[in-house]
Amino acid sequence: MPLKGWQQDGDHSVAVVWSTVARTPPAARQRLADINIGTRFVATQESPVHENIKNAIVSATERDTRLIMRGLRNTERVLTNRAVEQVLEKEAELGSAVSFQDIPSLVTGVYARVMRRGEVDAGPWSCGMVVGLVNDVPSVRDLINRIMQQAEEIISHRFCGFLPTAEE
Ligand SMILES: Cc1cc2nc3c(=O)[nH]c(=O)nc-3n(C[C@H](O)[C@H](O)[C@H](O)COP(=O)(O)O)c2cc1C
């Protein structure tokens, strides 16, 4: 699956991935791996967030995320930091009695400070467990090419087991 035409149109490669998925037989499709993409793209050269955030993502391991606001039925997975620990302490302290009024100063209005100003501890910010696999800050172009190459490897190695053999 070479990325012909990638220079002109970044969406093209995504379209190639999806059209490949769409053409995959249903039995094989059930075995398709999901792709973790949100957190990964935050740590790219073009991502308009502060360098501190990209560095925090690169430095983190898969053990560095926490789930907050579970008791509020508003669960968010975030990268742990001082503010997150404060939220968790508050939630543990209040138990099932916790309400949104108990934590607003800790969780609202923090994204601009975190993402734009690079104040990584200003509040909780979303981050997938895939953060443990993010070890660099490539350009989007290089990242997409890498994803496509890995997808091609998965399709050609894992899916070849679905092809009928000569005896079938
Ligand atoms: C910067 C950022 C902002 C996010 N904002 C939201 C949001 O507003 N609502 C939501 O349901 N999930 C949000 N998410 C969570 C993602 O939808 C996704 O569940 C999470 O990142 C895990 O997927 P991933 O491994 O592909 O990153 C956000 C994630 C990131 C990294």
Image (cartoon, grey):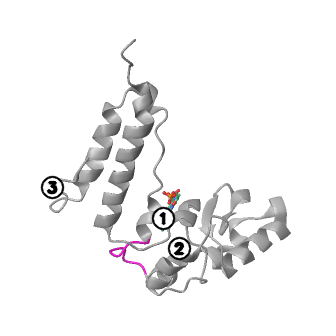
In the image, which residues are magenta? 43-49
Name the spot of residue 74 as percent of width and height, x first: 63, 58
Q: Quadrant of residue 68?
A: bottom right
Q: CA distance from mark 3 to mark 1?
A: 26 Å
Residue 67 drawn in magenta: no
Q: Residue at x 61, y 67 (%)?
A: 78
Against 13, residue 61 (above or below) is below
The kind of secondary structure element at disc 1 is: helix
Against 51, residue 1 (above or below) is above
Q: Which residue is mark 1?
A: 39
Name the spot of residue 97 as percent of width and height, x first: 81, 62
Check disc 2 and give the amino acid type. Ile
Quarter of the C terminus within the rendering: top left
Q: Residue at x 45, y 51 (%)?
A: 35
- Could you tell which of marks 2 and 1 lies nearer the N-terminus? 1
The kind of secondary structure element at disc 2 is: helix
Q: CA distance from mark 2 to mark 1?
A: 8 Å
Check disc 1 and give the amino acid type. Thr
> Does ligand 1 reach within 8 Å of label 3's beta carbon?
no
Proximity of marks 2 and 3: CB atoms separated by less than 8 Å: no
Q: Which residue is mark 2?
A: 57
User: What is the tally of numbered marks visible in this picture?
Assistant: 3
Q: Which mark is residue 65?
A: none
Q: Image check: 121 left or right of 89?
A: left
Proximity of marks 2 and 1: CB atoms separated by less than 8 Å: yes
Check disc 3 and give the amino acid type. Gly
